[in-house]
Amino acid sequence: MIYVTGDTHGDRERWRNPRYGLNGVLKQGDIVIVCGDFQYLYDNEKREDEECFLDELSKQPYTILFCDGNHENFPRIYEHPIEMFCGGKVHKIRQNVLHLMRGQVYEIQESTFFVMGGGYSIDKRNRMEGISWWPQEMPNDEEYEEARNNLKSHDYKVDYIITHTAPESTMHVIAPEYEPEKRLNDFLQWVQDNVSYKQWYLGHLHIERAIWKKQTVLWFGVVPLS
């Protein structure tokens, strides 16, 4: 079974505490996709402790896939080898913990997934570059181009879309004054307007809500894909 959930923000209880859906739901052979802000590779000063927790996750009988959000330590993620997984590129963090790279299309259990991470930190003025904020939080030109090419090669049709943030029209409904990540929102709007999909899941907004146009925002919710 494949499940999708929202931002985990390095919260270890999401995986340890039986009260949380992840711990109580996931079984051997399951896959869970995190819609950004995974954040278990984040604090350089606590690197050894974080690596130990990732080793703990590596012993679980399920697979964790995550797209990146804006609260990630990108140099830490990029240290890991790039491999192919289900037709798309990933950073292999552990055998069962994989970073889904931007603009990739994956075929997982007979369903196709387009993934586009990235987002803007509205609190970045309170963060320090290289310590608690990294400029790679927003996609670059090459990532946008690769995303377009991969969607074209799949005839602009996928089953699921996984992102951290939302298309411009959706963002306008939820936060009409939000401007800082507009280039990414506009790109996702192009995806919404040009790509056929069954369902779109995103995080970033710290709410649980089915919005419109087959788009659902997740945070702590754990949704099974039928």
Image (cartoon, helix red, strand yellow):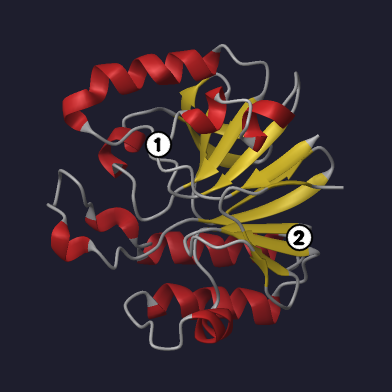
Residue beneath label 1, please? 10
Residue beneath label 2, please? 158
What residue sits 38% from the left and 33% below the top? 40
Q: Quadrant of residue 195?
A: bottom right
What residue sits 65% from the left and 76% below the top? 192
Q: Quadrant of residue 209?
A: bottom right
Residue 79 is left or right of residue 204, and the answer is left
**In the foreground, 18 or 160:** 18
**Circle 1: residue type:** Gly
Residue 163 is left or right of residue 74, and the answer is right
What residue sits 53% from the left and 16% below the top? 58
Q: Are marks 2 and 1 in contact (CB under 8 Å)?
A: no
Determine whether 128 is above or below 55 in the image.
below
Between discs 2 and 1, the one toward the N terminus: 1
* Residue situated furthest front in the rendering: 19
Determine whether 106 is above or below 158 in the image.
above
**In the foreground, 52 or 115:** 52
How many residues crowd around disc 2 within 10 Å: few (fewer than 14), some, or many (20 or more)? Answer: many
What residue sits 49% from the left and 53% below the top? 102
Determine whether 196 is above or below 3 in the image.
below
Q: Nearer the viewer, mark 2 or mark 1?
A: 1
Residue 85 is left or right of residue 53, and the answer is right
Q: Secondary structure at mark 1?
A: loop
How many residues crowd around disc 1 within 10 Å: few (fewer than 14), some, or many (20 or more)? Answer: some
Q: Secondary structure at mark 2?
A: loop
**Circle 2: residue type:** Val
The x and y percentages for residue 217 are 61, 63
The x and y percentages for residue 28 are 75, 18
Residue 23 is left or right of residue 142, and the answer is right
Name the image quarter holding the N terminus.
top right
The x and y percentages for residue 153 are 69, 60
